[in-house]
Image (tube, rainbow, N blue to C red):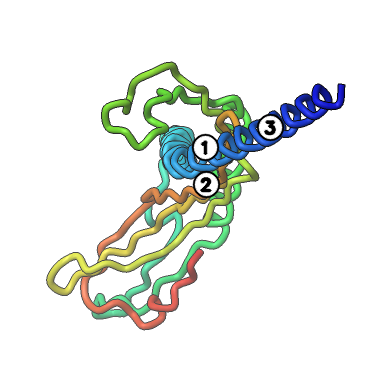
C-alpha cells in the first residue's frame, strides 16, 4: 500500500514538473512570438492608420476649398511704397481664424462619420517572412480617432527664382489615430499639409514679413 502511494506521489510530482516545463516553454514561445509580431503589426497599423486619415482629411479639405475659392488676398495683404517696393505684409486675421475653425469642424465631423473605418490585413503580413507576406486569412484592423484633429494655418517663404520669393499659406492638420488588432492596440500621430494660397513677391521680402505670424 505504501509503495502504491509512493508511486502515485512520484507520478504526481513528475506530472507537476512536466506541466511546469510545458507552461514555461509555452510562455517563452508566446513571448518570442509577441516580440516577432508586435513590431510588424505596429508598422502595418501605422501605415493603414495614416492612409485612412490621409484619405478622410484630403477629401474634407478638397471639398472645403472647392466650396470656398480662397485666394492669397483673403489671408494676407502686401503693401508697397511709391516705387513699387514691398514694404510690409499684413495678415487678415479674421479669415485665418474663420478657415481654421471651419476646417476643424469639417474634418472632425468626417472623422466621426468614419469612426467605424477598418482595413483588412493578411495574417502573413504580420510576420517577418517575405514568403508569407500578403498571404493567409485577413485580420480586421479597426481605426478611429483618439481625439479631435487640430488645424493650424502656417506661413512660409520660399525662394522662387532671381529676386523673387513665394509666400505660401498652408493648412497643417494633425490627427491622433487609434488602431486595434486582436491582442494589440496602437496609437499613431499623423500630420498632413495642404497648400491654401500662395503669392510671388518681387524684390526683397520686407523685414516685417519675416516675423509674419505663424497663423
Please count the marks in the image. Answer: 3
The answer to whether residue 111 is left or right of residue 20 is: left
Mark 2: which secondary structure? strand
Provide residue 43's location: percent of width, then percent of height: 42, 42
Mark 3: which secondary structure? helix
Q: Mark 3 vs mark 1: which is more N-terminal? A: 3
Q: Quadrant of residue 160?
A: bottom left
What label sits on residue 29 in the rendered view? 1
Residue at x 45%, y 19% (from the top left corner): 138
Label 3: how many residues lie within 10 Å, few (<14), some (14-19) or many (20+)? Answer: few
Q: Mark 1 vs mark 2: which is more N-terminal? A: 1
Q: Which residue is mark 2?
A: 188
What label sits on residue 14 in the rendered view? 3
Residue at x 57%, y 27% (from the top left corner): 114
Using the image as rendered, state which of residue 81 and residue 200 is in the foreground.
200
Provide residue 145's location: percent of width, then percent of height: 60, 39
Amino acid at each position: 500500500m505504501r509503495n502504491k502511494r509512493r508511486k502515485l506521489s512520484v507520478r504526481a510530482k513528475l506530472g507537476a514538473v512536466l506541466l511546469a516545463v510545458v507552461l514555461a516553454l509555452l510562455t517563452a514561445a508566446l513571448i518570442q512570438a509577441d516580440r516577432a509580431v508586435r513590431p510588424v503589426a505596429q508598422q502595418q497599423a501605422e501605415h493603414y492608420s495614416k492612409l485612412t486619415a490621409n484619405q478622410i482629411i484630403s477629401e474634407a479639405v478638397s471639398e472645403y476649398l472647392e466650396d470656398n475659392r480662397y485666394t492669397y488676398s483673403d489671408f494676407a495683404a502686401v503693401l508697397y511704397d511709391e516705387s513699387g517696393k514691398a514694404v510690409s505684409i499684413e495678415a487678415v486675421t479674421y479669415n485665418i481664424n474663420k478657415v481654421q475653425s471651419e476646417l476643424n469642424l469639417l474634418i472632425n465631423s468626417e472623422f466621426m462619420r468614419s469612426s467605424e473605418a477598418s482595413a483588412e490585413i493578411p495574417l502573413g503580413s504580420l510576420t517577418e517572412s517575405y514568403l508569407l507576406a500578403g498571404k493567409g486569412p485577413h485580420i480586421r484592423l479597426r481605426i478611429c480617432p483618439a481625439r479631435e484633429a487640430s488645424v493650424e494655418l502656417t506661413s512660409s517663404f520660399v525662394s522662387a527664382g532671381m529676386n523673387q520669393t513665394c509666400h505660401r499659406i498652408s493648412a497643417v492638420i494633425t490627427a491622433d489615430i487609434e488602431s486595434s488588432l486582436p491582442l494589440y492596440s496602437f496609437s499613431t500621430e499623423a500630420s498632413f499639409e495642404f497648400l491654401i494660397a500662395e503669392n510671388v513677391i518681387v524684390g526683397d521680402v520686407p523685414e516685417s514679413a519675416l516675423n509674419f505670424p505663424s497663423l
